[in-house]
Amino acid sequence: MDGRLMVMAVCALVAIAFVALGVPLVRRSVPPNWVYGFRLPQTVNDPALWYPANEYAGRWMIAIGIGMLAAAVAGYFTPLSLDVYAITVVAIAGGGAMAMLVACLVWLTRRLRSRSTTPGTSDRAT
C-alpha cells in the first residue's frame, strides 16, 4: 500500500470514529460517566447539564469527523507531497478538536451563568 493511500485510510478511520462517537452524544444516549463524553465535575454531577453539554460536544465531533474525512479524501487526489498531505489532515483534526474544546467550555460557562441568574432555562444545546 502506498503512503498516500495509507494516510487516507488512517485519517478516514479516525474521522469515522469521530462521527461514530459523536452520534450517541447528540442522541443523548450516554449517561453521565467519567470515561466518555464532555467530562467535567459540573457536567458529570448534573444530568440536567450533562445531556445538553454532550449533545453540543457531539455535534462538534460529527462536524470535525466530516471535515477530516473530506480533507483526507480530497487531499488524496491533490498533488501535495505526502508530508504536506498528512500534516494538513492532522492539522484540520487538531485544530477542530481545539476549537471544539474552546467552544464547549464557552458554552458551559454561559450555561452555568444563565442558570445562576435565570431559573427554568431550556436544556437543549444551542
Image: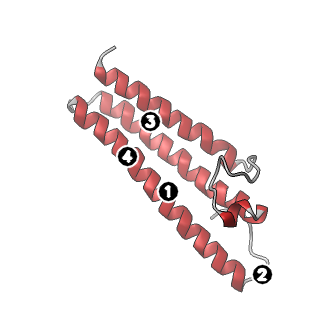
**Which mark, by number, is residue 83?**
none
Q: In the rendered view, tell whether residue 55 sits above or below residue 89.
A: below
- Residue with the mark numbered 1: 100
Q: Which three-letter amino acid code belongs to the residue tagged 2?
A: Pro
The quarter holding residue 12 reads top left
Q: Are marks 4 and 1 in contact (CB under 8 Å)?
A: no
Crowding at mark 2 (Cα within 10 Å: few <14, some 14-19, many 20+): few
**Which mark, by number, is residue 119?**
2
Mark-to-mark CA distance, 4 and 1: 12 Å
Q: Which three-letter amino acid code belongs to the residue tagged 4?
A: Ile
For the point 38% across and 33% down, the residue is 72
Mark earlier in primary sequence (4, 1) = 4
Mark earlier in primary sequence (4, 3) = 3
Mark earlier in primary sequence (3, 2) = 3
- Residue with the mark numbered 4: 92
Q: Are marks 4 and 3 in contact (CB under 8 Å)?
A: no
Crowding at mark 3 (Cα within 10 Å: few <14, some 14-19, many 20+): many
Mark 1 or mark 3: which is in front?
A: 1
Crowding at mark 1 (Cα within 10 Å: few <14, some 14-19, many 20+): many
Mark-to-mark CA distance, 4 and 2: 39 Å
Q: Are marks 3 and 2 in contact (CB under 8 Å)?
A: no
**Which mark, by number, is residue 69?**
3
Horizontal side of 69 relative to 29 (left or right) equals left
Camera-side residue of 18 and 79: 18
